[in-house]
Image (spheres, rainbow, N blue to C red):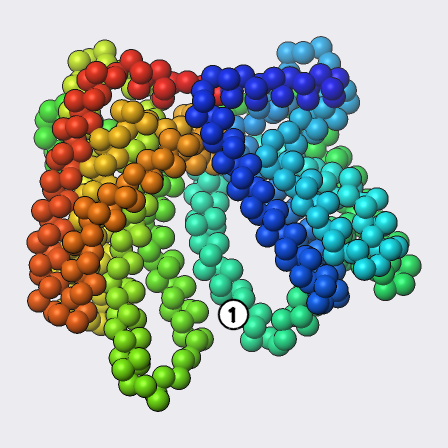
Amino acid sequence: MAALLVGLRLRQLGRALGRSPWAIVTLVLSVLAALGGLGLLALMLATLRAFAPASAADAVVIIGSALVVGWMVASLLVSADDALAPERFALLPLPARRLLPGVLLAGAIGVGGVATAAALLLTLIGWSTHPVALLTAAVLVPLQLLTCLLAARALASALARQLARRSGRDLSLVLGSVLIISAGILFAILLEGLRSLGPPEAVFGAIAQVLGWTPLGAAWAVPQAMAAGSWLEALAKLTIAIATAALLWLVWSRDFRARLTDPIASTGGGRVRGGAWIDRVLPASPTGAIAARGLRYRFRDPRHLINVIGVAIVPLLVLAMNLVVGNGVSIDLTADPGEQAALDTFAQLGPMLLPLLGAIVLMSVAQLDAAYDSSALSTHVLTGVTGTQDRAGRALGMVVLFGPMLLAMCVLATAVSGDWHLLPASLGATIGTAGLVIGVGSAISPWMPGQTPAPETSPFGKGSSGGAQALLGALITMLAIATVGAPAIGTAIAAAWIPWLAWLSLGIGLVVGCLATWGGVRIGGSALDRRWPEVLAGVSREG
């Protein structure tokens, strides 16, 4: 049965790749990204092994604990899109004990599972200075991989009934997205805190010692105890590791059996409010109706809500990280006043240009907006909506929602820097970039609608990155920003030395942003009129 389920999973993935060449490109890019991460891991462990063997052992314990946590978090984010959920086997006349091994193995099929297995093998580099520890670590690799897989399954099973409710799913996804987006600043703050505690090797050694006695890192700490000659400690940690895997299996198997006979049904979000104020603000036309629908979806659909959160908090997180980390960095340039003045000027430019990040995050929103509609896009075709009306409605909805958001960021960033004379420059650069992003996204979307998670699935599931089409669209958009958007951004930067250029940047940004949006709507609308069937087929494709 295990071989059958693994074979079915492989055929499922093969069919998904066979349906679209873009899926193959996405897989290749994912593999390349995984190989890059594995290469960095190997380089880090090899360096530590050569110059600090004790630190290499500590790093392995921390890395192993992080892998377990990563699998647990990922299981919650993609739980709504689980192709191996127990409910899918409820009608089969098979007991749970025959299904469990195959489901567990099939769940490891994919880039994430293979990359994790490879990472576990690479951790052997950290133990290569001690033969006994190396042999012990090699024997424990299957247990370590089993712990990662079971931790993900057990946590998702334990919270399955809560996540079946719309409110629970939305809350977990929003919190998860905020944590993922803010991971950079959290990591920076953590490093700053650890640096203040003492030498890095001592701090990481203490962390590894604590994790080694927990279910997260016990399986990776056994070789470390063996290398130190602490046989009783190694036995105790091995007992913790085996007990952890056994407990996780028990939790998951009991829930699996229960859901085979009592499937969990997902529930909706309750009453939907009308939002009549949107209809009063927007024009009573197809363009206005499309814009109003888009605005409602931005806050009702978790897939759209995460994009809104990204645009809103990415610049704020970068600003906060600059304040947190920057305050701990001091550079003595008193011997050269010219260099100090240049540094102060660039410090002014940082907050002023941060809202640009929010405008750049709009790239995927503008290009993939139609893909989020999936097969529901057919209503535009059947009701006679023109391509220009579709493009204009989507662009109008983005301007109404994200326009005030970006303007508020410009004001906030300028207030932090204290240089109010640069506010027009910040507005010009941000408006020009946002207009370019919306215009280019509207223009290229009919040819590259991209891939998105299907409705009612996890925003972090299949298609969450937009696929290869989104990557190509991002490259095109960045090229447009670097060329057409250069005058507004360039004059905004120059305004730090020549103040009157701030108003020139604002004027250029307004002209470029408006013309780019108008041109993108016209070009994209004309192309959409010719390519409605292809676009509808592309966004409706499953797998």
| Residue at the image point whose x is 30% and y is 38% from the top | 476
Residue 80 in picture, x, y percent from top left: 51, 30
The N terminus lies in quadrant: top right
Q: Residues within 10 Å of mark 1 (few under 14, many from 20)?
A: some
In the displayed structure, 535 sits above or below 512; it is above
Q: Quadrant of residue 280?
A: top left
Q: Amino acid at mark 1?
A: Glu
Number of marks present in the image shown? 1
In the displayed structure, 415 sits above or below 270; it is below
| Residue at the image point whose x is 20% and y is 37% from the top | 439
Residue 3 visible to the viewer = yes
| Residue at the image point whose x is 67% and y is 18% from the top | 7
Residue 134 in picture, x, y percent from top left: 83, 52
Q: Is residue 44 left or right of residue 299?
A: right
Q: Is residue 300 left or right of residue 24?
A: left
Looking at the image, which is closer to me, 313 or 116? 116
Looking at the image, which is closer to me, 270 or 235? 235
Q: Quadrant of residue 316?
A: bottom left
| Residue at the image point whose x is 25% and y is 73% from the top | 345
Residue 429 visible to the viewer = no
Residue 367 in picture, x, y percent from top left: 30, 33
Which element type, helix, strand or loop, lies under badge 1?
Answer: helix
In the displayed structure, 19 sits above or below 346; it is above
Looking at the image, which is closer to me, 65 or 41? 41
Circle 1 is placed at which residue position? 192
Residue 495 in picture, x, y percent from top left: 16, 66
